[in-house]
Amino acid sequence: MKVSDEQIIAAILSCSTNIQAAEACGLSEKQFYNRLSRPELKEKLAAARSKLLESATSSIAARVGEAVETMASIMHSEETPAQTRLNAADAIVRNSLKMSERTDVLDRISELEKAVKEVEDGKH
């Protein structure tokens, strides 16, 4: 039975190790790594990983508001121990600072990319 690239990719994405993925496909390690070395399979695998990461990122992003609301409700609850409320407040502040810094860095990168493009366009 011929093992398709898609079967190999599915095994890689669902197994903890490449050895387990090879076994799941019914391939020897040598056969598995030979197939994995092919550029077309590498491209398909990179695309599949990217799609999986994008999906996971979207799923996490969809729950950020809910997580912040949970921390805020813990922070405001009089029934919650003071240390736990303080931890929730600290987590909110720390994470908001990280997000602000990252947003600032991404904005600066975007501005630099625009400037570089303008310089490059001016040379042509």
Image: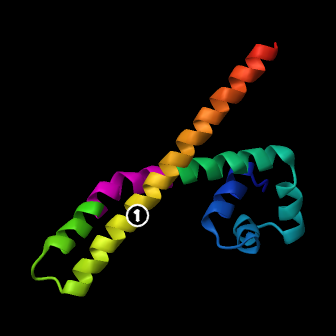
Tell me the residue that label 1 is attached to. 95
Please say if 76 is above or below 59. below
Q: Is residue 87 above or below residue 9?
A: below
Magenta region? 55-67
- In percent of the image, x 74 and y 17: which residue is there? 121
Q: Quadrant of residue 77?
A: bottom left
Q: Main secondary structure of the magenta part?
A: helix
Residue 64 counted in the magenta span: yes
Q: Is residue 90 left or right of residue 31?
A: left
Q: Secondary structure at mark 1?
A: helix
Q: Out of 68 and 27, give the one closest to the viewer.
A: 68
Identify residue type, mark 1: Asn
Q: Would residue 58 be visible to someone looking at this image?
A: yes
- In percent of width and height, residue 8 lies at 72, 57
Left or right, 107 with reference to 49: left
Q: Is residue 33 above or below residue 117?
A: below
Q: Give the residue at x 28% y 71%.
A: 89
- Residue visible at 28% across and 74% down? 88
122 left or right, relative to 84: right
Q: Is residue 55 visible?
A: no
Where residue 91 sits in the image (x, y, percent)? Answer: 35, 71
Quadrant where the N terminus sits is bottom right
State the image coordinates of residue 46 (x, y, percent, origin top left).
71, 49
Q: How many marks?
A: 1
Give the quarter of the figure containing the C terminus: top right
**Label 1 neighbourhood size at 10 Å, few (<14), some (14-19), many (20+)?**
few
Nearer to us in this view, 101 or 15 = 101
Residue 56 is left or right of residue 49, and the answer is left
Q: Residue at x 70, y 24 (%)?
A: 117
Membership of 82 in magenta stretch: no
